[in-house]
DNA sequence: CGTTGTGAAACTGTTCACAGCA
DNA sequence: TGCTGTGAACAGTTTCACAACG
C-alpha cells in the first residue's frame, strides 16, 4: 500500500538479517498476536497449528518464520516463547514505542482510549487538535497543534497518527514532520505528500468499503445472472 | 489480507470484463478518490498527472485502467468524467450500498458520523450494540444486537462493520451472517472464522503500528550503526 | 507530436514437495 | 516418525519500452 514500500533490510538486533518481504513483515505481526492468544500451558506449536489459527497456509508461515532464522525443532514444532520473542525482537516490539495523535474527534478519542495499544507496547504520549484544547483524556491533556511546531525534533522516534478531517491532514503531517516524526499512520481520506524518508501508511475506510462492495457485487451478480450472461 | 482473495471476475455492468488483479482493484479505489479532488474545470487528465497525484507510476496506472477497457485518447489523456464513471461503475459505486455497524463505542460513533461514507455512496442504515441501546445518532437509533438474529436475511447485500471489542467480534460476525451479510469490515483485533463465501477484511490498528515501528527501527538503526556504508 | 495501450521482461511473492534432522 | 527448512517451480505484479493512433 505504501507508495514505495520496498524490501526491508535490517541489521540491528540480535541477529543480522537480510531483506524480508513487506508482506511477510505484515503477517509476522499477525502471528505475534495469535501467539498471545495461545493457551499458556502449551509450550510448543507446529507450523500447521499456528498457520490454521492465523488464516494462512503452513508453507507460507514456515517461509515467513525462516526469514528470522531457523530455531524450530524438526519433528516437533516451534517453542512458543522463543518464537514469540524472535518475532517481537524482529518487529522491534522489545522497546516501547511512543505515539502522538493529531485530531481528537470521535476517531481520535477512540484511538486515544484504545487499550489494545498499551498491550502491544505502544504508549500514547501526546494529543493535538485545533479545538478541544485542554480536554483531558486519561492522563493526557489535548494540546494545540501549534505546540508541535514550537518543539522541533521533540517527537523524533515517535509514531504519528493523523485522525483529522481530510483538509487538515497535510498540515498535520507537516507539523508532525517538523516535530521529528518520521513514521505516520494516516486515517484521513487524503493523499499526503512528504519528503523522502518519511513513512506514511494510509488506512482508508471508504476504500476498504469500496473493495468489499466490489466483491459483494460480484457475488450478487453471479447469483443473479443467468439470463444476464452473454 | 483476505484469506483466499483470488482474482476477481466480473460479468455484470455495462461492459463484460475478465479477471482484474486484486492489487489493481485496490488502487482503482484510490484513483477514484483522487479524481474527486481534481479541479472541476479540468476535463482531461493524463496518466502521468493522475499517477503523480495518486502516488504510483504512470505505467502501473495505465495498466490498471486498461483492465476496464480502452477509452483514453492517445496523445491527450483520459476524459475525467468518463474515467470516473468507468471506475465507479466497475467498483459498483453506481448503486447505493447500505452499511450496518455493530459495536457503538468510540470507534462505532466515529464511523456512524463519518461524512465521507455518504459522499462515496455508502449509507449507514443500522447501528447495533449490547449497551447504548436507544441512543440516537443522526437519524438512527441504536438497536440491540439480538435484533439481528430476529430478522434472518434482512440485511442481505449490506456491508457489515464490526467495531466491537475483540472478544465480541466473533459473535458480531455470526449475527451479521445470520442477518444475511456476506461482506464485513472488521476493526476488532481478532481473527474471525466464518463460512466460505463471506468476505472479511481486517483493519488492525496495532498491526499497522507494528509495521511502522519496524520501519522506524530500521531507520534509526541505519542512522546509528555504521557511519555511512555507501 | 504526445500519450495511450500492451507485449514481453523482470521482479516479487507463494506454493510444492521433499531432503534433512530431532 | 513427523515436522522444519528450503530449493525449485509457479503465480502474480510491476516495469520497460515501443508500436499504434488521435
Image (cartoon, coloured by chain):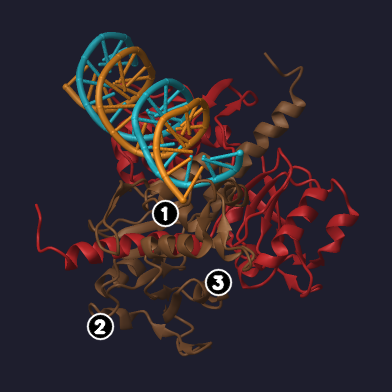
Chain colours: A brown, B red, C orange, D cyan
The foreground one among A136 and D9 is D9
Numbered badge on residue A151: 2
Dot 3: within a 10 Å radius of its alpha carbon, few (fewer than 14), some, or many (20 or more) residues?
some
Assign a secondary structure to mark 3. Answer: helix
Residue at 33% x, 39% y is: B51
Secondary-structure class at tag 2: loop
Q: Chain of mark 2?
A: A
A148 to A226, vertically: above or below = below
* First along the sequence among labels 3 and 2: 3
Tell me, yes or no, whether dots 1 and 3 are on the same chain. yes
- Spot occupied by residue A160 in the image (x, y as percentages of width and height): 38, 70
Q: Position of residue A154 (x, y in %)?
A: 26, 80
Q: Image height check: is B14 above or below A166?
A: above
Is label 3 on the same chain as label 2? yes
Q: Quadrant of residue B64?
A: top left
Residue at the spot x=52%, y=74% of the render? A119
The CA span between labels 1 and 2 is 45 Å
The answer to the question of whether label 1 and label 3 lie on touching residues, with beta carbons closer than 8 A, is: no
Residue where numbered disc 3 is placed: A116
> Which is more N-terminal, label 2 or label 1?
1
Counting other residues with Cα less than 10 Å from the Cα at mark 1, is it few (<14), some (14-19), or many (20 or more)?
some
Of pointers 1 and 3, the one earlier in the residue sequence: 1
Disc nearest the viewer among 1 and 3: 1
Residue A222 shows which numbered tag? none
Measured in 3D between alpha carbons, the distance from the residue under mark 1 to the one under mark 3, in whole angstroms, is 29 Å
| Camera sees residue B46 | no
Comparing A153 with A65, the one in front is A65
The answer to which quarter of the image holds residue B48 is top left
| Disc 3 from disc 2: Cα separation | 29 Å
Which of A118 and B134 lies nearest the eye of the viewer?
A118
Please give the name of the residue rendered at 59% of the width and 55% of the height, measured from the top-left corner.
B117
Q: Which residue is mark 1?
A: A71
Amino acid at each position: 500500500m505504501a507508495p514505495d514500500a520496498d524490501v526491508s533490510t535490517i541489521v540491528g538486533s540480535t541477529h543480522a538479517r537480510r531483506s524480508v518481504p513487506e508482506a511477510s513483515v505484515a503477517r509476522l505481526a499477525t502471528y505475534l498476536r495469535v501467539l498471545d492468544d495461545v493457551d499458556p500451558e502449551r509450550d510448543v506449536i507446529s507450523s500447521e497449528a499456528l498457520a490454521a489459527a492465523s488464516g494462512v497456509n503452513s508453507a507460507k508461515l514456515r517461509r515467513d518464520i525462516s526469514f528470522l532464522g531457523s530455531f524450530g525443532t524438526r519433528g516437533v514444532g516451534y517453542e512458543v516463547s522463543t518464537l514469540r520473542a524472535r518475532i517481537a525482537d524482529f518487529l522491534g516490539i522489545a522497546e516501547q514505542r511512543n505515539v502522538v495523535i493529531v485530531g481528537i474527534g470521535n476517531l481520535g478519542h477512540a484511538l486515544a482510549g484504545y487499550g489494545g495499544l498499551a498491550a502491544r507496547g505502544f504508549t500514547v504520549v501526546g494529543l493535538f487538535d485545533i479545538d478541544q484544547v485542554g480536554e483531558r483524556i486519561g492522563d493526557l491533556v489535548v494540546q494545540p497543534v501549534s505546540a508541535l511546531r514550537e518543539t522541533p525534533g521533540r517527537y523524533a522516534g515517535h509514531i504519528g497518527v493523523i485522525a483529522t478531517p481530510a483538509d487538515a491532514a497535510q498540515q498535520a503531517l507537516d507539523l508532525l514532520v517538523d516535530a521529528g516524526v518520521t513514521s505516520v499512520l494516516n486515517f484521513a481520506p487524503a493523499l499526503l505528500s512528504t519528503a523522502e524518508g518519511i513513512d506514511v501508511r494510509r488506512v482508508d475506510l471508504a476504500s476498504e468499503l469500496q473493495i468489499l462492495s466490489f466483491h459483494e457485487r460480484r457475488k450478487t451478480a453471479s447469483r443473479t445472472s443467468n439470463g444476464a450472461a452473454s
